[in-house]
Image (tube, rainbow, N blue to C red):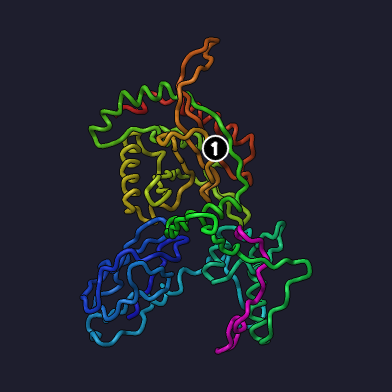
Amino acid sequence: MDVRLPRLGEGADSGVIATVFVREGDQVKKDQPVLELESEKAVATIPSPAAGTVTRVAVKEGDEIKVGSLILVLAEDGAGAGAAAPPSARAIDASVGDEVPEETAIDVNTGPAAPPPGVPLTPAGQSVFPVVHSAGAPPPASPSLRKIARELGIDLYRVRGSERGGRIVMADLRAYVQNVQRLALEGRPAAAPPAGTREVRPSPPGVDYSQWGPVTKQKMTTLRRSISRKMVESWTTVPHITQFDEADVTDLLALRKKYAPKYESKKAHLTLTSFALRAVVAALKKHPSFNASIDEGAGEIVIKNYFHIGIAVDTEQGLIVPVLRNVDTKSMFQLSSELHEIAEKTRARKVSLEEMQGGTFTISNQGGIGSGHFTPIVNTPEVAILGIGRSAVKPVVREGKVVQRTMMPLALSYDHRVNDGADAARFIVDLVKEFESIKDADVRI
């Protein structure tokens, strides 16, 4: 049987082979690991779907492969080592990938009939449409539509958007597919773009920077490419606004100093991020529109009644955001223990894709590095993220007197499509109150 790369999770459609555990002639058991794949932000283990003998290994370390790519050929037990069985249903399913959800599926039969066998979808050597979107930034489209286009192999740079600013919607994608089929059936070249449409390259040509002096080149890792793609998508699809404030954490730091040794003795680390988890969830319960996502296809705002908080972790390979689940149900000690455990797991690149999915809100704490105020980028499909900077002792007025207090900078970036400035102001005011109202009883073990 042909063993192909299965889909590992939402948005995980490719990766780089990190380790190959088997060689030709090896006997493997069902679910035995056959390779490790660095996919998106995790290193995932790929198991064998059946027991048998490896008759061919089709990949090597460093290869970049996509969902459906052949990994190895396996002669199942009883089938004979010299002949590979036909692909199983599981292997075929893996090569195709997940189906497009029914509510967003493109019905390619609503227009011209599909091409007959032997007729290519696109005329040989030609693009159906020229590039029509500006260079340097991805075409404007929702994350869900990008996923559909990626799975169908459609280059969005060639799809003309009908909404304001050239934004591509599902109707545009459907029209594109129907035009591809029509042109293929007619066997004629694609029509030129309408007058006034400027054809551009999807990316600028490379520049030889060495002509001005010495350079050092570093190949972008899979993780760095993933971060780059995610950040560009978020910045170009989400109208970002950042609300700033400061929280007085003088008393909170005293609590931390008091209880940190007890937490350490039980292998848990009481940090400012531990307190932030508690404060953020309390504020989200008062302002649920910040614990949400947009369903653009349905035209709905989805309010989530659970609190899975993502924590931005700085690793040697780049930024990774694992998720702590059901934060509202856990004690400060439980949160501190889980936070330390998942952070260590993330830095060792042992966190799974499942542990990075399902987040409802993200916290990025740069205080330990020494940063002050900053403007974090929303971790889509979430609609808000909290940035925490380095605390500093400042003179402040309390009851008419100037006193020294330790103030912690806060930066709330949010999706302006869901929340307005007044909403964000109310949220961050309540968040500050939650930081300043944490008591001894909340921390005591």
For the point 60% across and 62% down, the residue is 204
Question: Up-down: is 223 above or below 29?
Answer: above
For the point 50% across and 34% down, the residue is 283
Kind of element beneath mark 1: strand
Name the quadrant containing residue 250: top left
Question: Up-down: is 80 above or below 233?
Answer: below
Q: Position of residue 218 (x, y in %)?
A: 43, 57
Question: Up-down: is 408 above or below 234?
Answer: above
Q: Quadrant of the N terminus?
A: bottom left
The reply to whether the magenta stretch includes residue 279 is no
Q: Position of residue 91 (x, y in %)?
A: 38, 76
Horizontal side of 407 relative to 105 (left or right) equals left
- Can I make out residue 376 in this image? yes
Which is more toward the observer, 76 or 165?
A: 165
Magenta-highlighted residues: 115-138
Question: What amino acid is found at the position of numbered circle 1 in the picture?
Answer: Leu
Q: Quadrant of the C terminus?
A: top left
Q: Residues within 10 Å of mark 1 (few under 14, many from 20)?
A: many
Horizontal side of 404 relative to 421 (left or right) equals left
The reply to whether the magenta stretch includes residue 127 is yes
* Residue picked out by circle 1: 412
- Can I make out residue 110 in this image? no
Q: Main secondary structure of the magenta part?
A: loop
Q: Position of residue 120 (x, y in %)?
A: 58, 84
